[in-house]
Image (cartoon, rainbow, N blue to C red):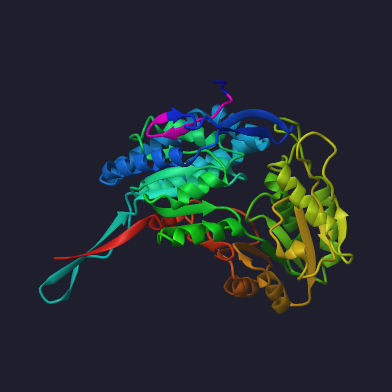
Amino acid sequence: MADTDRLNHIDGKDLPAVSGATLRLVDPATGLTHGTAPLSGPEDVDMACLAAEEAFLGWSLTTPAERQTALLRIADALEKEAGTVTAAEVADTGKPRALFLGDELPAIVDVLRYFAGAARNLPGAAAAEYTPGRTSVLRREPVGVCAQITPWNYPLMMAVWKVAPALAAGNTVVLKPSDTTPSSATLLARLAAEHLPPGVLNVVCGDRDTGRSLVAHPQVRLVAVTGSFRAGQQIATAAAADLKRLHLELGGNAPVLIHADADLDDAVEQLASLAFYNAGQDCTAPTRMLVDRRIHDDFLARFAERAARQRPGAPDENETDFGPLANAGQLAGVSGLLERLPGHAEIVVGGAALPRPGYFHQATVVAGVRQEDEIVQSEVFGPVVTVQPFADEAEALRLANGVPQGLAASVWTRDHDRAMRASRALRTGVVWVNTHGTTVSEMPHGGVGHSGWGSDLSLTGLLDYTQVKHVML
């Protein structure tokens, strides 16, 4: 078996699929095959879930200090193997190597270390007598076997966002990474195996059918997924049959409210970098620029000029700002949205795939769009930004809230009162003021509406992986 062939990790062992079936892994920067991964079937899922159930009996009884130690050691292992981890992630995603190593990996390690500490700080009510002669105590306990399904845009980061709180709370995990980007998840499992009992963290590679088998497995008590709204709908429907708990992060369509008093130089510089980071494949990417009509033309000209200087490129090319789209289907989806633009919309910058191997697309700015347009209502998930004018604060909020998604937004203004009004009125899980996109391990990350429910990160994210038991003495 070649070094580029990935394996499942089940009950502490690296295994191919029982059937021997494999998936082809494609490098998005070249369009060429770079390895294979197992195409797991129901037998593989069953083995992983039964191993996780058996391991739960012991792992759930470990002390928070023991779980903390394990997570800290896994964090140290990722740092120590930074080069290997980066190579695995870049092979599947085509991300600029320096950006993953400098931006993403330190944040991933920080999440593990945060939840290592949070494991020892679960909140709880004090024991008390609410009726004579009886003392009530609340226990906060792990849920059980957690099925976790992660996407292809940030494969390792999203895996750690899911795995770390689940393990910190005393659960066991069966993780299914995206069929196109499983490499870093399988590596994470192998590194973690040196510090966890067998069966605590299992990884099964595969396609949508693999995911369906995992969601339906009777041993699974909680399903956590980061993916599309459609995927969330299907998983919620399947999980309802067995009343499994759900944790859904289903993407976004982030509005950016730029008022006339904003610092335009700062706004343009920050937003142009963030909008195209990771080729726009980010659920919090600032994709819908809503601009006070008094400064609309000025902002559009500045932003378009800055966007035109954003360079797509391969992982090790010099001066690369973002890499390729994740796969051929995603490139076709972005291209299709642009091809279907209505006549009143105008592509100001970009608008086309690059004529080179791989799945590269130009940084693109579209003006003249209307609220009902497909490109405004949809999560583009590519290097594409729309720009719309607004007349006043009320219209800005109406446009911002006028989409089904509700994950993130930002407000750009020097007026503190306006910023506070917008923060209250925006129907999203996070609001940034005069910045955009920064996450910290200590604060929750989750949305409303079609962006799902439940929170990653923070103590809130840890509590999502627990259940409460009332004990009366």
In this view, 9 is above or below 141? above
Query: 91 left or right of 458?
Result: right
Chain part drawn in magenta: 4-13
The x and y percentages for residue 300 are 83, 60
Rendering quarter of residue 113: top left
Q: How many marks?
A: 0
> Can you see residue 392?
yes
Q: Where, quadrant-wise, is the C terminus in this rendering?
A: bottom left
Magenta span: chief secondary structure: loop
Check if residue 322 falls in the magenta segment.
Answer: no
Residue 11 lies in magenta, yes or no?
yes
Residue 323 position within the rendered picture, expressed as x and y whole percent measured from the top left: 72, 39
* Vertical relation: 120 (above or below) 378: above
The quadrant of the picture occupied by the N terminus is top right
Name the one closer to the observer, 123 or 374. Answer: 374
Q: Residue furthest front?
A: 19
Q: Position of residue 369 (x, y in %)?
A: 82, 66
**Residue 461 or residue 307, whichever sits in front:** 461
> Measuring 53% from the left and 60% from the top, which residue is drawn there?
446
Height in image: 289 above or below 48? below
Q: Residue at x 30, y 62 (%)?
A: 468
Q: Position of residue 318 (x, y in %)?
A: 76, 32
Query: Which residue ends up furthest to the left in the rendered image?
Result: 133
Asked if one can make out residue 432 in the rendered structure from this viewpoint, the answer is no
